[in-house]
Image: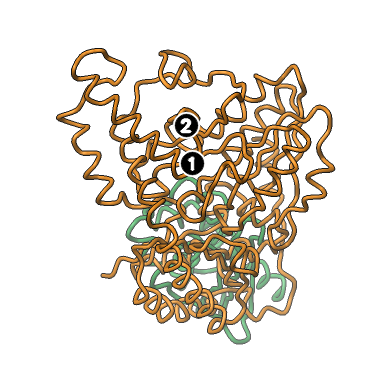
């Protein structure tokens, strides 16, 4: 049911973990749906230098988290803010329709982390 | 890669003896048992032989067995057929919150058509309070429907005691015994049930066949209209090969159940004790007394991890199991059984069910016990809930809206 790319990111997730002293943290999701994603950011000169994630969730939740970190690294925060959940799903060659609601929140988590960064640095 | 199948409550492989017995009924003996000619006559005996084999396993008369297409059909037939036949007597049905959807959704359908349904709660171990059950009976109660064994936890319900209560109040008693038949002794006389449903593919027969035991003299409305098959009780050309297979599977269950499930129980207990003693933060779901569960079922929650991720990692090691998480249930919420037992929402998403058959081996259990702890640890290290200080966000407004809309 999952594409090869989803399975690759699920079995070998990129950038798992936490950043020590991050300058932005975002969390979305809830236990009721069964998906919680947390993103940690290191931003320097408005550029995302490092991203890490921790996710409680299904295969799609972990794969989208991993993919969003890959897509975000090296981008300016404004570029990262226009990344959508849809773009993350497309970068994984798509997700099963049932997974589009709960498990495809990784871009939202990234946006929350950027908001947190902006709030702390304004 | 190894292939270890531990999802036998979902379905089982067809037993070789069953398949051998079925094969002649596809090519050589293909007739319609309702036909008068040689081709029909050739197979009608086979249907009656299978009926005897099923009846012998359940300790009833062959005339009390109606062949159906699956367990869900049997449950629909029993409940809707009773509701319609006894509508003049009353409109109240008693069931439990942990039934299979074939029972729950049938009851919900009847609620929309003027029936009232009491859904009995279960305690944290998944057990019923029989005083509560008896107190729920009114003069309008026409049916009590309680499963013999729960498919997720394996919990065995006190069917004999419920049969006694139903009998004393003269209320009809139906049990969905799909998970129990073939794994534990099932005797419809001793248990005083009026209707019992079993499914072929859970006991080594193929998918697409099941049976309904209907106690002689039990008034029912026909469920499937058409031909005169099954003494006018269930129309539709007989699934001859499937029915023959079901008969042989029931005979094998009668002969081997005690020996096979003593063996299965040892494997299940070894896996259960192995997991509980080596993996921290694990919760057993179901009754803590293993005698009160099916001998083949183990349901455990690995805290901080979502069930589908675990199943995918198990699958990569060749281990097939199932989960009560929302992602695997096909809905937006985790298992209704876990919810009914008051299991914490994270733990409900973390539940994994291992269900054995006599084809499993001790070597397979050792393999799982070796492979499982590192997988669990890897996913926990990835989880924001593991070693979490702040409270876990619990609710989802969007989900609630989705539920309202549907």
Q: Position of residue B205 (x, y in %)?
A: 35, 45
- Up-down: is B129 above or below B367? above
Q: Is residue B363 left or right of residue B375?
A: left
Q: In the image shown, does B27 or B107 lie closer to the viewer? A: B27
Q: Is residue B26 left or right of residue B270?
A: left
User: Which chain does tag 1 point to?
Assistant: B
Location of residue B25 (image quadrant): top left
Kindly state the secondary structure of the residue where label 1 is placed.
Answer: strand
Mark 1 closeness class: few <14, some 14–19, many ≥20 residues within 10 Å:
many
Tell me if I can see residue A79 in this picture. no
Say which chain is green: A
At 63% from the left and 86% from the top, the residue drawn is A21
Q: Position of residue B207 (x, y in %)?
A: 37, 41
Do marks 1 and 2 both belong to one polypeptide chain? yes
Say which chain is orange: B
The way the protein has been coloured in the rendering is: by chain
- Mark nearer the N terminus (1 vs 2): 2
Tell me if I can see residue B97 in this picture. yes
Q: Is residue B123 left or right of residue B65?
A: right
Image quarter in which the C terminus of chain B is found: top right
Q: Position of residue A112 (x, y in %)?
A: 64, 65
Q: Which residue is mark 2?
A: B65
At 58% from the left and 62% from the top, the residue drawn is B293
Marking on residue B198: 1
- Up-down: is B77 above or below B252? above
Q: In the image shown, does B218 or B56 lie closer to the viewer? A: B56
State which mark lies toward you, 1 or 2.
Answer: 2
Kindly state the secondary structure of the residue where label 2 is placed.
Answer: strand
């Amino acid at each position: 049911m999952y594409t090869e790319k989803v399975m690759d990111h699920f079995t070998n997730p990129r950038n798992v973990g936490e950043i020590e002293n991050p300058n932005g943290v975002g969390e979305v999701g809830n236990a009721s749906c069964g998906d919680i994603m947390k993103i940690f950011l290191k931003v320097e000169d408005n550029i995302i230098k490092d991203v890490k994630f921790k996710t409680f969730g299904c295969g799609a939740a972990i794969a989208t988290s991993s993919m969003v970190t890959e897509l975000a690294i090296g981008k300016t925060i404004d570029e990262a803010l226009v990344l959508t959940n849809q773009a993350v799903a497309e970068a994984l060659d798509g997700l099963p329709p049932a997974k589009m609601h709960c498990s495809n929140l990784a871009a939202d988590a990234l946006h929350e982390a950027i908001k947190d960064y902006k709030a702390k640095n304004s | 890669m190894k292939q270890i199948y531990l999802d036998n409550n979902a379905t089982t492989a067809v037993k070789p003896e069953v398949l051998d017995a079925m094969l002649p009924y596809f090519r050589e003996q293909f007739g319609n048992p309702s036909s008068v000619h040689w081709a029909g006559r050739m197979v009608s005996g086979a249907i009656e032989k299978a009926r005897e084999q099923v009846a012998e396993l359940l300790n009833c008369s062959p005339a009390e067995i109606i062949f159906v297409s699956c367990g869900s059909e049997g449950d629909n037939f029993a409940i809707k057929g009773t509701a319609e036949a006894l509508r003049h007597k009353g409109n109240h049905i008693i069931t439990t919150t942990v039934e299979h959807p074939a029972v729950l959704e049938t009851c919900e359908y009847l609620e929309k058509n003027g029936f009232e349904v009491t859904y009995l709660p279960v305690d944290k171990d998944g057990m019923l309070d029989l005083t509560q059950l008896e107190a729920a009976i009114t003069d309008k109660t026409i049916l009590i429907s309680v499963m013999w064994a729960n498919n997720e936890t394996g919990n065995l319900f006190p069917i004999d005691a419920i049969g006694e209560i139903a009998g004393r109040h003269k209320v009809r008693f139906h049990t969905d015994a799909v998970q129990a038949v073939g794994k534990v002794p099932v005797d419809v006389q001793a248990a005083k049930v009026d209707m019992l449903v079993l499914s072929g593919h859970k006991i080594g027969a193929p998918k697409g066949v099941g049976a309904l035991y209907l106690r002689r003299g039990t008034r029912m409305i026909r469920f499937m209209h058409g031909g005169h098959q099954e003494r006018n009780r269930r129309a539709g050309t007989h699934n001859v090969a499937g029915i023959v297979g079901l008969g042989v599977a029931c005979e094998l269950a009668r002969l081997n159940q005690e020996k096979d499930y003593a063996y299965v129980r040892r494997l299940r207990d070894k896996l259960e004790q192995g997991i509980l003693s080596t993996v921290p933060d694990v919760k057993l779901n179901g009754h803590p007394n293993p005698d009160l569960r099916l001998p083949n079922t183990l349901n455990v929650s690995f805290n901080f991890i979502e069930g589908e991720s675990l199943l995918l990692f198990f699958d990569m090691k060749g281990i097939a199991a199932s989960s009560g998480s929302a992602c695997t249930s096909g809905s937006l919420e985790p298992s209704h059984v876990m919810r009914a037992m008051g299991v914490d929402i994270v733990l409900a998403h973390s539940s994994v069910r291992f269900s054995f058959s006599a084809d499993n081996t001790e070597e397979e259990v050792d393999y799982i016990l070796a492979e499982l702890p590192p997988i669990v640890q890897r996913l926990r290290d990835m989880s924001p809930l593991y070693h979490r200080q702040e409270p876990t966000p619990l609710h989802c407004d969007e989900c609630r809206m989705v539920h309202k809309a549907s």
